[in-house]
Image (cartoon, grey):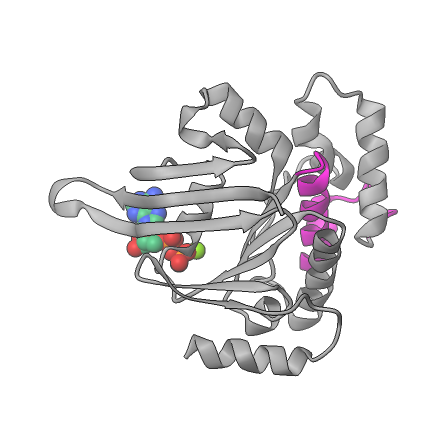
Amino acid sequence: MKNIITAQNIIKKFGVGDEEQVVLRDISLTIQAGEFVAIMGPSGSGKSTLMHALSGMDKVTEGQVTFDGKVLALLKENELADLRRNKMGFIFQQPTLLKNINVLDNIILPAMRDKRKHRSTIIKKAQELMERTGISGLEKRDITQMSGGQLQRAGICRALLSNPKVIFGDEPTGALNSKSAKEIMNIITQINQNGTTVMLVTHDAQVAAKTERILFMRDGQIATEMTLPRYNGQDLHERIDKVTAIMK
Ligand code: ADP
Ligand code: MG
């Protein structure tokens, strides 16, 4: 197995002097290519900060993050931007889509910044992804006319358009009703089964139960870690019970 992300003794502090707050306290971890990982833990425990550190959105104060063989801190700003654009995909609780352009244009917007790619190739790929995520036919739809689940699907299409190695999701189902949340999780599980590494921050035991490794954070550290067999559609209730038990 190949390591896709390595964190070595990372520390993240915010603020200076009296205001200083240590948010990540010496975290080391390795994520292998193809893994499906959930990060859980109480609000404020550092989940989002950890994900920002691993994805190079934020610099760590101490320690080192390696992504796909590259030490993030050694990259020039444009190299880091390229890496983030081409090798990582991001899904948020509420996808940040622009209201004045249609769904398809929103999906292709970040990819269009890559001058090496043709618009027609990008559109073809976007349409395949829309089909896969169940929103084909909505290309011209106004963003304001989309449901939460449809918006999240569009966000996923946008994140997948560059064929990223890793998908990072910060509470991707957090704003959805339980039916939509399940559907979105099925899509994310499918993405992982096709070989993409997926890392999700979630509060939801039902979401975490579908992953194969759960990191429980507490006060800036990984307090506990749990592995599960790869989810094959079976024993979901037992898996949820296991996750819930360890959350307590
Ligand atoms: P979680 O995602 O687990 O809820 P976060 O990683 O968002 O937690 O935040 C952990 C702590 O770090 C919180 O106390 C938060 O206030 C602080 N924090 C996060 N981002 C910043 C920032 N940009 N500046 C200052 N403090 C921050
Ligand atoms: Mg958070």
Q: Identify the residue at horizontal 69%, vertical 51% (top origin).
A: 151
Q: Residue at x 70, y 16 (%)?
A: 115
User: Residue 117, percent across and down?
Assistant: 76, 21
Indicate the quadrant where residue 16 lies.
top left
Left or right of 190 in this view: 4? left
User: Which residue in the rendered view is the most extreme toward the top?
Assistant: 115
Q: Residue furthest front?
A: 1
Magenta span contains residue 184: no
Residue stretch in magenta: 135-164
The answer to whether residue 238 is visible is yes
93 sits to left or right of 232:
left
157 in magenta:
yes
Q: Quadrant of the C terminus?
A: bottom left
Q: Nearer the viewer, residue 80 or 8?
A: 8
Query: In the rendering, at what x and y percent does residue 166 appear?
Result: 61, 43
Q: Residue at x 74, y 77 (%)?
A: 234
Depicted 211 relative to depicted 159: above or below: below
Q: Nearer the viewer, residue 194 or 205?
A: 194
* Towards the viewer: 63 or 97: 63
The total number of labels drawn is: 0
Relative to 224, residue 97 above or below: above
Say whether residue 101 is left or right of residue 92: right
Position in image of residue 169 (x %, y %): 57, 52
Residue 138 seen anywhere in this rendered image of the structure: no
Query: Going 71% across and 71% down the picture, which residue do you hit?
Result: 179
Q: Between residues 100 and 123, which one lies in front from this camera angle?
A: 123
